[in-house]
Image: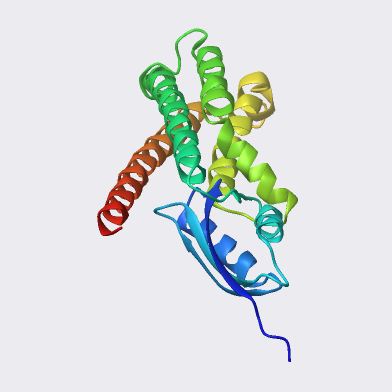
Amino acid sequence: METKRLATGIFPVIGMGCASCAAKIEKALARSEGVESAEVNFASQTATVRYDSALASPDSLREAVRAAGYDLETRQGPDAVPRFGDESAAGRRSLGWRTAGAVVLALPVAVLGMFFHDAPYAGVVMWVLSTAVLFLCGRGFFVGAWRQLRRGAADMDTLVAVGTGSAYLFSLFNLLWPSFWTERGVTPHLYFEAASVIVAFVMVGRLLEEQAKARTTDAIRRLEGCIL
């Protein structure tokens, strides 16, 4: 009887945006051939996998994670974690700039939508600003939702993209073809401010979450350094 050659690897996970993402990746790894156990830590953004090296490899684990809509950093060695940390820092900076842009652009949309929606060209201004908020600052939600849709799955990005995208498209229809409703005795309303504010709020929450995860990861690494 052939003896199992068990190996344990800790791999940084790329693309996790919520706790359900971690659960999905964990299930994908656990179902992979040769995997004895898999644990995904959302806080540290890593996956700890115990697998039979005769049946599985870091590359096969990465393919399983990619099939679930995410990615796995398979490089091992002392330079792997710092490289991943640098990429995370760059990602947080990019998210910070996009979040700031979303908040700045969503604020006038909210003011116009709540208090000056009858002003001349208010609808056009809200349309332009909302387009920038959703598809420039918040494009990651739609990219993530499309990635999950291709695999027949859904996550937090799907929820945000469907909700805000529906409000945006409905408002655009009402802005360009208001007669469709007025001819039927219905007043067409615009919901650009709802779509913009939701995207801005979710991005603020995600930024705070990323900062908290970064602090947690740094604390864990310092603790590991003290123990070692």
Residue at 51% in and 26% down: 137
Residue at 45% in and 10% down: 119
Q: From this view, report whether residue 61 is shown above or below residue 148.
A: below
Report whether residue 185 is seen.
Answer: no
Q: Nearer the viewer, residue 114 or 201?
A: 201
Q: Nearer the viewer, residue 18 or 176?
A: 18
Report whether residue 219 is seen.
Answer: yes
* Res 146 quadrant in image: top right
Colouring style: rainbow
Judge from the rendering whether residue 211 lies leftward or rightward of residue 125; answer left or right: left
Residue at 71% in and 60% down: 60
Whole-percent x, y for residue 162 in the image: 60, 43
Q: From this view, report whether residue 52 is shown above or below residue 138.
A: below
| Residue farthest along the top direction in this orientation | 120
Whole-percent x, y for residue 179 in the image: 67, 22
Residue at 54% in and 20% down: 132
